[in-house]
Image (cartoon, rainbow, N blue to C red):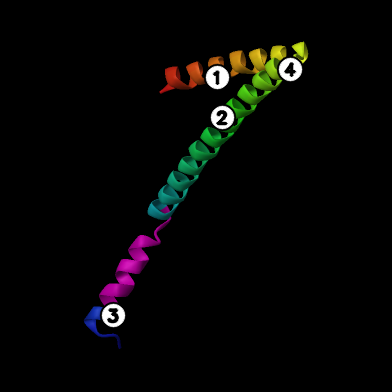
């Protein structure tokens, strides 16, 4: 009923939708999105730690300075662990 070109196109679409290839691509996209969102969270945390430290220095608030140093130290540890895992 279908001509050869249409039949070939349907077979190609069916091959693309096989469970193994579809699942592999879906998990690959999910893993990439997870890495990007984790990176965004770390960058936001870095910026927040620096702003907390600078706010404490310029406002002469010891608590902010301490919180900035503490957050910076924790983020250095997190970045070091991420680099060593690669």
Which quadrant does the N terminus fall into?
Answer: bottom left
Q: Which of 36 and 67 is in front in this view?
A: 67
Mark 4 and mark 3 in contact? Answer it, CB < 8 Å.
Answer: no
Q: Is residue 10 above or below residue 35?
A: below
Q: Residues under labels 4 and 2: Cα distance?
A: 20 Å
In magenta segment, residue 14: yes
Q: Which region is colored magenta? A: 7-19
Q: Residues under labels 1 and 3: Cα distance?
A: 54 Å
Q: Which callout, 1 or 3, points at the residue further toward the start of the chain?
A: 3
Q: Where residue 11 sits in the image (x, y, percent)?
A: 31, 70
Q: Residues under labels 4 and 3: Cα distance?
A: 68 Å
Q: Nearer the viewer, residue 20 or 39?
A: 39
Circle 2 SS class: helix
Q: Is residue 50 above or below residue 70?
A: below
How busy is the neighbourhood of tag 4: few (under 14 within 10 Å), some, or many (20 plus)?
Answer: many
In magenta segment, residue 67: no
Chief SS of the magenta region: helix
Measuring 59% from the left and 28% from the top, which residue is drawn there? Answer: 47
Circle 3 SS class: helix
Name the residue carrying label 1: 78
Q: Nearer the viewer, residue 33 or 58?
A: 58
Circle 4 SS class: helix
Quarter residue 64 falls in: top right
Q: Residues under labels 1 and 2: Cα distance?
A: 9 Å
Q: Which of marks 1 and 3 is in front?
A: 1
How busy is the neighbourhood of tag 3: few (under 14 within 10 Å), some, or many (20 plus)?
Answer: few
How busy is the neighbourhood of tag 2: few (under 14 within 10 Å), some, or many (20 plus)?
Answer: some
Residue 42's disc number: 2
* Residue at the limit of the structure toward the left, as seen here: 4
Name the residue carrying label 4: 64
Quarter residue 44 falls in: top right
């Amino acid at each position: 009923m279908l001509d050869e070109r249409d039949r070939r196109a349907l077979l190609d679409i069916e091959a693309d939708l096989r469970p193994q290839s579809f699942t592999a691509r879906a998990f690959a996209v999910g893993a990439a999105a997870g890495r990007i969102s984790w990176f965004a969270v770390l960058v936001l945390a870095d910026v927040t730690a620096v702003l907390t430290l600078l706010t404490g220095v310029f406002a002469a608030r010891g608590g902010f300075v301490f919180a900035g140093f503490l957050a910076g130290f924790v983020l250095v540890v997190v970045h070091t662990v991420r680099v060593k895992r690669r």
